Amino acid sequence: MILAMTMFRQEFVENPVFTDFVLYLYFISLLILFAFGAHGFVMVYHYLKHRKNEPSHPPLTSTPIVTVQLPMFNELYVVNRIIDAVCAMEYPKDRLEIQVLDDSTDESVEVAAKAVARYRVMGYDITHVRRGDRSGFKAGALKYGLASAKGEFIAIFDADFVPNPDFLQKTIPHFSIDPRIGVVQTRWEHLNGDYSLLTRTQAFALDGHFVIEQDVRNKAGYFINFNGTGGVWRKEAILDAGNWQSDTLTEDLDLSYRAQLRGWKFRYLADVTSPAELPAEVNALKTQQFRWTKGAIETARKMLPEVWKAKIPLRVKIHSTFHLTNNIVFPFIILAGVLNVPLIFIKQKGGHEAYFAMMSVFVLAFIGSFLFYLFSQKSVYADWRRRILLFPLFMAGSMGFAVNNSRAVFEGLFRRKSEFIRTPKYAITEKQDSWMEKKYVARRKIDWVLIIEIALALYCLFGVISSLYYLEFAAVPFQLLYFLGFSFVSWLSIRHSLETRKLRQQMPRA
């Protein structure tokens, strides 16, 4: 190891051109990460300013016709659960239409058909909607169902959700406040948040978005987004904004911005929740993160020119830019991690004391992120002190997923189209539940993303050892976070893939 350090220093760090290149590139990387990380201070400021301005909940005084759309594709394990939950909603049957928008290609089609037939006999206005093809994916299915929807309002739930019985009673009344309210969005809750360390970390991350971001943006007058599920649209708003479009992987974010630019208002209800299942398997989570990241970049490319041309306040334009482009940080997370190692040797060489003193300012972005997630946990959970301990793991996970998400960023920037790959759901809610024997688990091979994750884990381990050897203790925490992040994600990817392959080999062939 000492020989490797010596060779690294002689081959690279002793070269002044290389040193200057690293110093400039590292500064640019941290500047971009600082800009987005420090945005946490803005969120915390608005949270503290508006936290007492809780929206009032008007009573349900009328019952307009509501269409509930359930888009699904090969959802064998959760079909019955979502249909049962929607049919259990406390809303008059004669004012409720349910569309099961089923693009499935497996036996879940028959399961859905049986569930629909069962509830039709019980007097529910529920239909099993089948298209000739899967064009447009989820956006195409929603648009297809909307053409025949009877409802003035359209509630949407993905198959992994289990809406509460009083969902419509708590959301529909808000549309009566203002005829320009186009969406009422609820906060996601987690059915299996305590299932594993992976789901606990996901819940921690999502709480930051749903408890702070969405609520703060709505109260402060910024644009927010419909989250694709767990909310209700005014049908008129969908049509006025140009209907569902499938040219991005995040049709919900796209339509949200088009609607708000048309003057429609959104109402976010942080105290009304919609329980949902989190991915329990890391490769499924990678797929979900890839789709969300790439879709957001595609939407940014599509909508930012419209945002800046619109007659809206400058502060809204600036905030929308941060909102739509925040995933751009992932390539710079990798870059900062890679450059951290040569910086150890450059610092040992001396002569850059002012540079390193100035770079310490960027630690403030870390503090901003910590406060952001601290308040998100404190607002919801009584045991927030225990939950905030997940923050280092969340940070490490963000670093570990940076390779997967950076790929999504570049594909989005360079207009590379890809199929809408839905996140498989396995009805995992209890600790004893298992996803490994389920049919939708992908048989992942070792791809170049995983190889890079493993290589970066080893590279960052070299950085940790080098920091300790040269007594650069201030660099150890960040080096360690990078190492743990890449190690955890790559290890889980390999472990889950091997466990799935072994189990399938033991299963009898049909």
Image: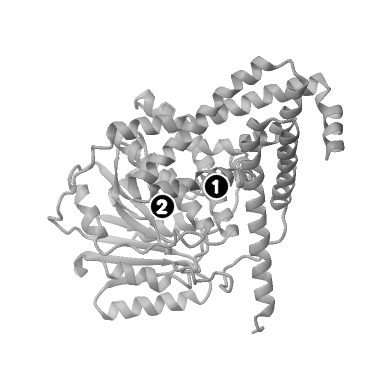
How far across and down, in percent of the image, does residue 72 sit? 45, 65
- Mark 1 belongs to which amino acid? Leu
| Residue at 37%, 59% in the rendered image | 275
How far across and down, in percent of the image, does residue 69 sit? 35, 61
- Mark 2 belongs to which amino acid? Gly
| Residue at 69%, 32% in the rendered image | 340
Observer-side mark, 1 or 2, equals: 1
Q: Secondary structure under badge 2?
A: loop
State the scheme by which the image is colored: one colour
Q: Secondary structure under badge 1?
A: helix
Nearer the N terminus, badge 1 or badge 2?
2
Above or below 272: residue 122: below
**Disc 2: which residue:** 228
How far across and down, in percent of the image, does residue 476 sit? 65, 36
CA distance for labels 1 and 2 = 27 Å
Between 44 and 446, the one lying in front of the other is 44
**Disc 1: which residue:** 393
Residue 149 visible in the picture = no
Quadrant location of residue 402? top right
